[in-house]
Image: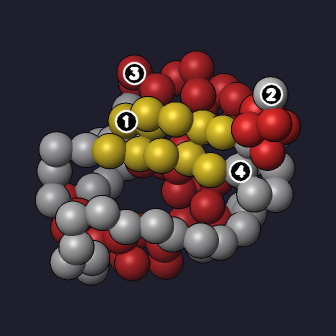
Amino acid sequence: SVASLLEVVNSLSVETAILVGHGPGIPGLAVTLADEESSDKVHSIHMKYPTAAITVLESDLPWEQWRAHTARIVDFVTPKDALN
């Protein structure tokens, strides 16, 4: 669930992390964390989050302070995008 994944994010003690999972948790977490500047990418995620898609988020906050709307989606790439 998004809540369980957010607990994992909030407990991280590294500078950079990769979460690997599947829907609806991973796309749900990305949409939940996304700030207003990420609205175009949020729309794309809502349209379709295919297998092997990647969402890259960043924030100036430490992991334990990540909550809804506190991160920017800097990239959303689907396998089809990667082939083009």
Please name the amino acid that badge 1 sits on. Arg
Q: Which residue is mark 4?
A: 53
Please name the amino acid that badge 3 sits on. Glu
Name the residue located 61 percent from the left edge and 61 percent from the top edge. Answer: 26
> On the rendered structure, is 33 left or right of 45?
left
Label 4 SS: loop
Name the residue located 16 percent from the left edge and 50 percent from the top edge. Answer: 61
The alpha-carbon separation of the residues under discs 2 and 4 comes to: 14 Å
Count of labels shown? 4
Please name the amino acid that badge 2 sits on. Asn
Mark with earlier residue (3, 2):
3
| Label 2 vs label 4, nearer the camera | 2
Please name the amino acid that badge 4 sits on. Ala
Q: Report crowding for label 1: few under 14, some 14 to 19, many 20 or more residues within 10 A (C-alpha).
A: many
Mark with earlier residue (3, 1):
3
Query: Which quarter shows the N terminus?
Result: bottom right
**Residues at discs 2 and 4 in contact (Cβ within 8 Å):** no
| Label 3 vs label 4, nearer the camera | 4
Q: Looking at the picture, tell me which residue is in the foreground, 83 or 4.
A: 83
Q: Which residue is mark 1?
A: 72
Q: Which residue is mark 2?
A: 84
The alpha-carbon separation of the residues under discs 4 and 1 comes to: 17 Å
Label 2 SS: loop
**Residues at discs 3 and 4 in contact (Cβ within 8 Å):** no
Residue 12 higher or lower than 33, as above or below? below
Name the residue located 25 percent from the left edge and 44 percent from the top edge. Answer: 59
Residue 45 higher or lower than 66, as above or below? above
**Residues at discs 3 and 1 in contact (Cβ within 8 Å):** yes
The alpha-carbon separation of the residues under discs 3 and 4 comes to: 20 Å
Residue 72 percent across, percent down from the top left: 37, 35
Q: Which residue is mark 3?
A: 37
